[in-house]
Amino acid sequence: MDLKDLKKTWDKLASNKELDEAQIREMLGKRTKNLIERIDRNIRIGFFVLFALILVFILNDFVLSPELVKNFEKELELPTWLQILSVFGDVIIIVTFLVFVARYYKVKKICDQTCDLKNTLIKIISTLNFYRTLYYISIFIILISFSINFIAGVYEGVLFKAHSEGIQINEIEFGDLATTVFITLFLLLLITVGVYVFFRWGFYKLYGNYISKLKLTLKELEEINE
């Protein structure tokens, strides 16, 4: 093969390589667009799920729980501060989601105008990771709030029952008190673990899986640029 033929072969290989890279970039761009569209859809789903959960929480805090307590003991009332604490947990959930939505669509709008594919991936992944951090912090706060509510509710119930029987709480038999504490902690553990697993599963189904796919797309894009 002479120098001229060698040059033609090299130019052909280089052209094919550029074509392959262009095709891969196009494929990655379509994949990214598809993933972002699914994230957009899941944000809307997340909004309706959040709205439904907040309605359930409000219904429980201001209707179901008070009615249940009244049916159990008519003279027993839940302390106002417990309801305030529950509302605080609801507000944390709402604020966390709204902060994420505002930041996500701000980043998306900027990237639609000025970002290339790589920067779009980096910013979207960063935003989703930011929300994941806020999400788990809010879950932690909610579980603490719920635990305080649960323990305080049991304590108020025990205290009321003791007073109705004309005794002080320190006069309750140790065995009965220990059994109440054990059952309370056991139920609290089951509920908190169940709530955590449910919310963790919900985040993964709505966003977590797409974070992994976006990271994989970014890695493939970086390999092309090397």
Image (spheres, helix red, strand yellow):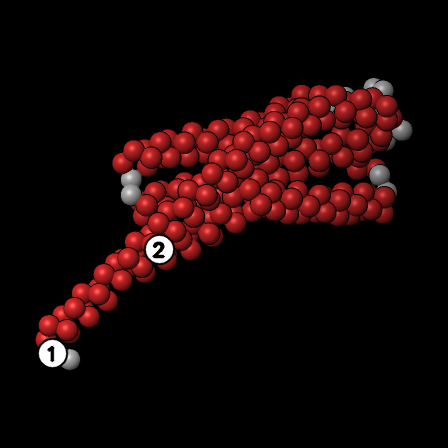
Residue situated in front as seen by the camera: 126 or 185: 126
Name the residue tied to disc 2: 24
Residue situated in front as seen by the camera: 23 or 146: 23
Q: Tag 1: residue type?
A: Asp
The CA distance from mark 2 to mark 1 is 33 Å
Q: Relative to residue 84, is residue 130 drawn left or right?
A: left
Residue situated in front as seen by the camera: 122 or 84: 122
Q: Tag 2: residue type?
A: Ile
**Which quadrant does the C terminus fall into?**
bottom left
Q: Relative to residue 109, is residue 150 drawn left or right?
A: right
Q: Relative to residue 58, is residue 103 drawn left or right?
A: left
Name the residue tied to disc 1: 2
Label 1 Cα crowd, 10 Å radius (few <14 / some 14-19 / many 20+):
few
Residue 72 visible? The answer is yes
Which-is-in-front pick, marks 2 and 1?
Answer: 1
**Which quadrant does the N terminus fall into?**
bottom left
Outermost residue to the bottom: 1
Residue 196 visible? The answer is no
Label 2 Cα crowd, 10 Å radius (few <14 / some 14-19 / many 20+):
some
Numbered marks: total: 2
Up-down: is 123 above or below 66?
Answer: below
Residue at x 86%, y 23% (from the top left corner): 71
> Where is residue 7 shown, x and y percent of the image?
14, 70
Q: Relative to residue 93, is residue 183 drawn left or right?
A: right
Element type where label 1 sits in the image: loop
Element type where label 2 sits in the image: helix
Quarter of the image where one finds residue 5: bottom left
> Where is residue 185 shown, x and y percent of the image?
73, 45
